[in-house]
Image: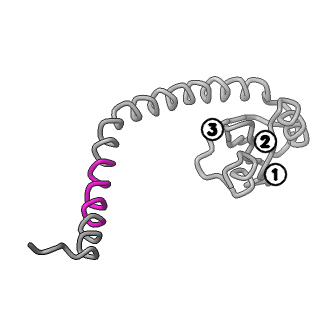
Amino acid sequence: MKILNTNKLALAALVGSLALTPAAFAAGTAADAPQKRAATAEKAGERGKLSADEKARLEQALGTGQDRNYYRPALEKMGYTVTSVNDSDADHLEMEVVKGDYSYEVKVDFDKTSRKSTKVDVAANLWETEATEKAKGEK
């Protein structure tokens, strides 16, 4: 009767355990995937609704007929942090603002003659600056 070499036995056990672990992990992940997708979709839907509600509220609260110096303090008074000014010229102002996990781009158009705002548009911020990511705690 031959006695098995201990090194070969240990190597066989190691290889067997490595092959089994990924298969077990994949099976567990596949079983959890539908629940995770549903939870993520539900959170995204809630976040999208909150985002649309906040967008409308912000546009109404900021309003038009204001001069350029009105907007930053007004946003800060509402709890927003202005993290970036992306565009600022005589007839346009574009800022990134953050409050909690939400980031918006606030665009304000101005009349060149009166220098008063004529349009305010708030949109979800898709291309965040590094300062915006930092304010949200992502960096």
Q: Residue at point 34% right, 43% down? A: 29
Give the side of residue 42 with respect to residue 34, left or right: right
Q: Is the magenta stretch mostly helix, strand or loop?
A: helix
Residue beneath disc 1? 90
Residue beneath disc 3? 123
From which residue to which does the magenta span run?
14-25
Which comes before the other along the chain, label 1 or label 2? 1
Q: Give the CA distance from mark 1 to mark 2.
A: 7 Å
Q: Residue at point 69% right, 51% down? A: 133
Location of residue 110 by image quarter: top right
Residue beneath disc 2? 110
Measured as percent of width and height from the top left, residue 19 is found at: 26, 60
Magenta span has 51?
A: no
User: Is 66 in front, or is 17?
Assistant: 17
- Depth check, mark 2 against mark 3: the one in front is 3
Q: Which amino acid does label 3 sit on?
A: Ala
Measured as percent of width and height from the top left, residue 94 is found at: 73, 48
Location of residue 41 by image quarter: top left
Q: Which amino acid does label 1 sit on?
A: Ala
